[in-house]
Amino acid sequence: MEVRRKERIDRGIKVRSEGIYCVSSPKEMLYVAGPRLLLIAGLLLLPLVLEMAPYWKRVVNIMCVYGLLAISFDFLANVVGLVCLGGAMFIGVGGYMTAIFNVYLHCPVFLAIPLAGLSGALICTVLLLPCLALRGVYFAIVTLMYPLLFTRIIEALNILGGTNGITGLDSFPNPYLENYVIIVLLLIFLFGLRRLMDEDIGLVLRGVKDNDQSVRASGINVAHLKALAVFITSFIGCLGGAYLAHLYMWAGLSLFALDFSIIPIAAVTIGGGGSMMGAVIGTFILVPLSEFLRFFGTFRIVIYCLILTGFIVFRSEGLLTYFARKYDQFERWAKI
Amino acid sequence: MSILSVENVSKTFGGLKALMSVSFSVKQGEIYGIIGPNGSGKTTLINCITGFIKPEAGKVYFRGSNIKGWPAHKIARAGIARTFQVMRPYYSLPAYKNLIIPLWSPRARAIGGWRGGGRHGDRDTVAVDILEEIGFERDSRVPYKMASTLPTGYLKRLELARCIALRPEIIFCDEVFSGLSASEVAGMVPLIEKLKMEGITLIMVEHRLKELFKVADRVMALQFGEKIAEGHYTEVIADPRVKEAYLGSEEV
Ligand SMILES: Nc1ncnc2c1ncn2[C@@H]1O[C@H](COP(=O)(O)OP(=O)(O)OP(=O)(O)O)[C@@H](O)[C@H]1O
Ligand SMILES: [Mg+2]
């Protein structure tokens, strides 16, 4: 019998080795930038395409909030090496902070959101600081506890509107702003984080994940770096939470829901970690999917789980890695 | 004047006395060897001096200030670099990118680039310069290979390169010769001598005594956490306690 094997051949750019490539012609530049441009253009056009479907426009908004959580989770987990399940904490703290600024202190929306992002990130970072020395799953567990802690405190002390939450937050001036604020935020942080990773400081952060002992031996304070990374992560998450609170015009206990911690991880798992791009792809599949499945009523969660498991089993490398390979290489059968 | 002086450093792990009141001092530009059988506390001594573990007692003076109890990164920033016996490269990065991290550190940035070349240039060039210096062929692909794919010989050198990139005053080498072939070691000796010429003080823990004695100015011997001998290597190996400690275990 004839023995054959599948061989993979690079296409497009010829001088390409271990992630370093050399582009010269406009065609090659387009080849490299193409997928990125497609994502940007697609996202920016989405609200216009969905003009007739306001419900789906809202899904896009929420999807982008999850996107923010997913890229920040990916950044902290796969770049710096801290597995943080604090999505719910960031969303909740950001949401409540913007409510305080907007409702209690009468700041306009576009001042309240950044203020909530900064102050929320500060609060979250300070709370997580004592846990930074914890490794692996212990850090994850602590980050999972905080949202519960916040809910109980708000309930028990009946502060910040108690179980009713804080109502009367300003909404966005118009529906387009509502869409584009979050889309632009997602794009800024997606490409911002990717840029950060290419900078030398990004390399140092990756070093912390690889082995922090060598980073310490190089005269770099690992605790500071981790705190900085946690601040960036919680800033992104808190902005998402603040946005969400204004979208709902309400900041309540459901902002601390577990979904905000879990869905980003699932998104990174199916999308592929480490590049932030996979996180976005994962979210863009998972969130709309879960909306579609609403038609199935209570059966939804079963199908959802099946699909998730399917992704993880059959594409465990992550969709992004899979697509990237298909894009960069073609396969053919070769005789041996 | 000695650049580093260690006074009565002690460390116990549970009931085990890993170091018992060890003292020594090293002059600037000296190559100081530390020998001793397995488990005699050599690595622990390095860890105590470089802040990776806290000694229970004693003092460590670096240029006159007591650095005992300082966090590791602060000690490194002051100018004391170290290699790890169990090599700790950044496996997920290419070899030259491994050096970006020490080059990015506050110390290296304050002092500037590596030699004349690349003082203001970008760190990648400086990194490849250092690797070339330490024996990575510049025009080959080796400096750009993932650290995880490099053989031990290169990893050992990378370990040392990471120290050099920090532009330190003292380098602690924890068995940088072990696992290398005789010819590889021969290739590294000139490098060690060159570092010495530049005024860098080297403190070398070694099991490869023959090679160590070629470069070391003075040697100290440890056994069961105690200093048993110190001086020129001829004196140290003539010491009856050292002979006993190494009896049958090592060819001198
Ligand atoms: N973290 C630790 N916890 C408990 N015991 C330790 C620890 N580190 C070292 N030891 C013990 O302290 C003693 C000295 O160890 P150390 O690693 O300093 O020896 P060494 O001289 O470097 O040996 P080798 O030549 O094998 O590298 C050993 O008995 C070791 O088991
Ligand atoms: Mg040792």
Image (spheres, coloured by chain):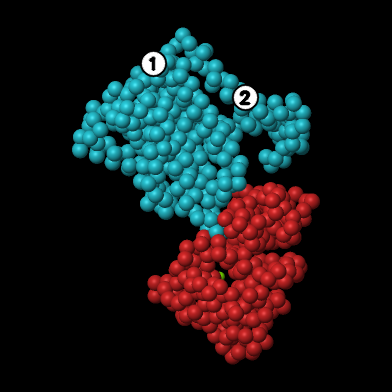
Chain colours: A cyan, B red
Residue B2 in the image: above or below residue A69: below
Residue A110 in the image: above or below residue B131: above
Query: Looking at the rendering, which quadrant does residue A260 occupy?
Result: top left
Amino acid, disc 1? Phe
What secondary structure is marked by label 2?
helix
User: Is residue A23 visible from the viewing direction of this image?
Assistant: yes
Tag count: 2
Residue occupying the point 39% across, 16% down:
A295
Residue A180 in the image: above or below residue B174: above
As drawn, which residue projects farthest toward the top? A52
Chain letter for mark 2, please.
Answer: A
Front one among A60 and A329: A60
User: Looking at the figure, which quarter contains the C terminus of chain A?
Assistant: top right
Residue B82, image x and y in percent? 58, 65
Residue occupying the point 59% across, 34% down:
A321
What secondary structure is marked by label 1?
helix
Q: Are marks 1 and 2 on the same chain?
A: yes
Q: CA distance from mark 1 to mark 2?
A: 33 Å
Front one among A253 and A137: A253
Residue underneath mark 2: A37
Residue occupying the point 51% across, 46% down:
A80
User: Is residue A2 visible from the viewing direction of this image?
Assistant: no
Chain letter for mark 1, please.
Answer: A
